[in-house]
Amino acid sequence: MASQPAPHRLLAGPAAAAGAEPLHAHLGRLAPWRAAAVRGPDLIAELDATGLLGRGGAGFPVGRKWRSLADRGAGSAVVVVNGAEGEPRSHKDRVLMAHRPHLVLDGAMLAAEAIAADEVVVYVGEEHVAAWSAIRGAIAERRLDDGPPTRIVRAPIGYVAGEASAAVSYVNRGIARPTAPPRPSERGVDGRPTLVQNVESLAYAALIARFGGAWYGEAGRGDARGTALVTAGLLDERPLVREIELGTTVGEVAMGIGLADTAIGAVLIGGYFGTWATGPEAWEVPLDPSAMRAAGLTFGCGMVSFLPADACGVAATAEVMGFMARGSARQCGPCRFGLAAIAEAADGLAACRAGTAELANLERLLGLVVGRGACHHPDGAAALMASALGTFSDEFERHVRLHRCSAPVVATRGVATLGAPSARALLGAVDRVA
């Protein structure tokens, strides 16, 4: 059952049609960030206590990440607000930036204060036009003395552009490629210690600073505490953004957007670094990062994409693998050659022109790329492909042995290349799944 967002949750506030929330409305609703009850080192401790995990995909504890910067005591750190969101089926970050830009900037200011940073860089995907406009306008609305100097940088289109070291590399050199150690926390923007934090994580920090960890823990089911933004929808249709209680099941998200279990063949959970599961397997899965990790799944970027029951999982996976190969940095062998070979093999299997030898070769290739890349891009792609081989095992066998597909809908109509709708269109049906 869906309802409107609870007071003070991420998407509470003006209606979607109002566009970006202006500063005066934001302050009237939440008060200035400098008036927050918990700030500085106390905020880091509060973030630790809540167990807030980063929402960019890796799920690293936010408090621990901030503390690693604060403990350096450099006094000249940088905060990079990561709004690149290069995964085409994830839209929650761009929606948040487009409609609640000041909440994101408040989180950045609080982070800068906590780690003694003297600069904030907001890194926004260049294709996220509404988000870019909202963030730029919000920066212009704020007083010059309201926190450290803040600038906005356009993140280039590309899946790896949002990886932390790639973001730093782009800010420094105009090249969005992951780099080897040292890590950004050690040597980032202009050689200074740098906190690279996802926009949703910062927005939560801004609310926790105002209302405390106990408030954050009021939502959630079972052992899971808090809420999260998820992007949900059929793989071949425009998705919607929802704010859910952690612990909400995949099935409840499906029903919340009008999908019945009989209409779903499989679910891609966690994004393109996530995993496939059959509809029945996924239906009762709780969207709880800790519980999912224990079950061999990943919450990732909060993407829950449903494959229609009449669509081909082999073809859908081939589309994603093609995107992952094209979206690599192409700076190491596993990405340049390994992912290209995996994508080519997956395409041949989807087209029913490959046999058992090609299937065996694909499985061999997966083992060759894992753990050998300059970043985790090939690992995530290989993990997704491996989950597809298990979830769609019968269909893969049909493709290689009979050279036929059982699904009447073989094409996925642009799974990986679906054009991004406007943030307003996406937010039109946003609510909290309770």
Image (spheres, helix red, strand yellow):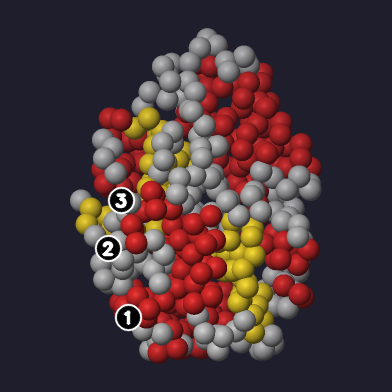
Q: Along the line of sight, which residue is nearer the eye, 53 or 240?
A: 240
Q: Which mark is residue 429?
A: 3
- Crowd class of label 1 (few under 14; some 14 to 19; many from 20; radius 10 Å): few
Q: Which mark is residue 28?
A: 1
Q: Is residue 19 visible?
A: yes
What amino acid is at disc 2? Pro
The residue indicated by pointer 2 is 5
Q: Is residue 430 left or right of residue 132?
A: left
Q: Residue at x 57, y 30 (%)?
A: 318
Residue 361 x, y percent position in the rendering: 68, 26
Say which label, 2 or 3, has the lower sequence index: 2
What amino acid is at disc 1? Gly
Q: Is residue 26 left or right of residue 108?
A: left
Residue 351 x, y percent position in the rendering: 58, 18
Does residue 331 lie above or below 280 as drawn? below
Q: Is residue 104 visible?
A: no
